[in-house]
Amino acid sequence: MKRDAVSWERAAEVCEAAQGWLRAGAIDEATHEAIREAYRDPCVTPSQVWRALTAVMTTAVILCALGAFHVAIRPSLKVLPVLFFLFATACLVATERLEASPRLARRGAAGATSFWGGVFVLLGLGLFLSATAGISDDSAIDAVLLASALVWGAGCWRWGPPLFAGFSAVSLFLFLGRFPSGRVLWVLAGAALAAVAARRLDDAAWAPSHRRAAAVLVVTGVGALYVAVNVYSLDEQLLEELQRFSSARIAPAPGRFAFIVSAVATAVLPLVVLLWAWASRRTFLLDTGIALLAVSLVTLRYYVHVAPLWVVLTVVGAVLVTLALAVERALRRAPGREMAGITADALFSDEQRQQVLQVVPVVATLTPPAHSPVAVEKGLAGSGGQFGGGGASGKF
């Protein structure tokens, strides 16, 4: 990323954190203004809804322009890659210009142009290799997957979208799955990727978006490792289906020892991730561990028919809800409302997330929230989000 873009991201992150501190009462208005003065964010940042709408409109313009060029010149299959490369170049140049402007960098258009730039590069490369170069399908797929890992990785490093890091990691694992020992490569690469990316989660030298990309890589690595060791994946030979067409796609059935080891790993890996989340206090690891645990329970139900699947899912959901309520109750009754550094109170950014969730139904209905007639009759008025005296507020 450019130095200016990194400084803009850091300033925005500090200002967002300061806003949370102000809402929670950790700082006063004067301190908040001093932080904003010290970390000025020159970028214009619209709401998530407007950024999504801008990205959709930019996508429509790009695809309509591509369709118009295709209808006007009607290129042959050998010339079509040139058209894709030209549009890819235009999208990437536009992304560079948009990212360099603080007025346009966060409006959503840069994300759309960078995404379609990468897509057009890969489409052009695939068509060139299969239609013009005339290489085999296996070699073309391998080249496109490897190029996809490089293109999306370079895009994440240059412009910062964490989603591109996920695209790059998925492409890399699909490429590794093409080899006869793909399952072993998934285990090794998944564990290595999660371990390396975890070391960068709090690296102050990295830009905020790059640290979020590291979190995406951790989840992707853990997910790939779980898929590789999952007993159902091993039993059904799911990863072996990714192998090259020219290779022996039917692998020998797993032995009893491999099946037992895979079954144990299927049960243990989600617990390891949950322990990791508990030790590191990272919510995205907690979410990942819960999701893997649910998949492991469904896998257990596939091999041990204790009840219909809908009954198992209902019981598991009820148990998780009961466990969450019990943990929350224990935390609220504990001294200081916390245990081992864990609290049930909303802390800073959590309130911002709740506000985002509250916006969703309003946007879906496109109607403003109704005002309470009782409050109007009693003459109550909003205080502009300020906290009351003596620590009185809606949160604490």
Image (cartoon, helix red, strand yellow):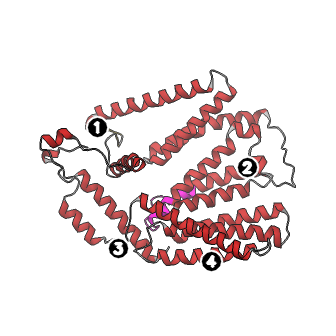
How far separated are the C-alphas under marks 4 and 1? Answer: 56 Å
- Quarter of the image for residue 20 reads bottom left
Q: Is residue 284 above or below residue 299?
A: below
Residue 356 lies, in percent from the top left, at: 38, 51
Residue sitting nearer the eye, 332 or 135: 135
What is the secondary structure assignment of the residue under circle 2?
helix
Residue 46 lies, in percent from the top left, at: 38, 64
Q: Amino acid at mark 1?
A: Arg
The residue stretch that appears in magenta: 195-212
Q: Are marks 3 and 1 in contact (CB under 8 Å)?
A: no
Q: Say whether disc 4 or disc 3 marks the residue closer to the N-terminus.
A: 3
How far separated are the C-alphas under marks 3 and 2? Answer: 48 Å
Q: Say whether disc 1 or disc 2 marks the residue closer to the N-terminus.
A: 2
Residue, disc 1: 337
Q: Are marks 3 and 2 in contact (CB under 8 Å)?
A: no
- The tag on residue 184 is 2
Residue, disc 3: 42
Q: Say whether disc 4 or disc 2 marks the residue closer to the N-terminus.
A: 4
Q: Say whether disc 4 or disc 1 marks the residue closer to the N-terminus.
A: 4
Disc 1 packing (10 Å; few <14; some 14–19; many ≥20): some
Residue, disc 4: 89
Residue at point 27% right, 55% down?
Answer: 21
- Work out whether residue 154 can be spotted: no
205 within the magenta span: yes
What is the secondary structure assignment of the residue under circle 3?
loop
Q: Is residue 351 above or below residue 307?
A: below
Disc 3 packing (10 Å; few <14; some 14–19; many ≥20): few
How far separated are the C-alphas under marks 1 and 2? Answer: 45 Å
- Quarter of the image for residue 189 reads bottom right
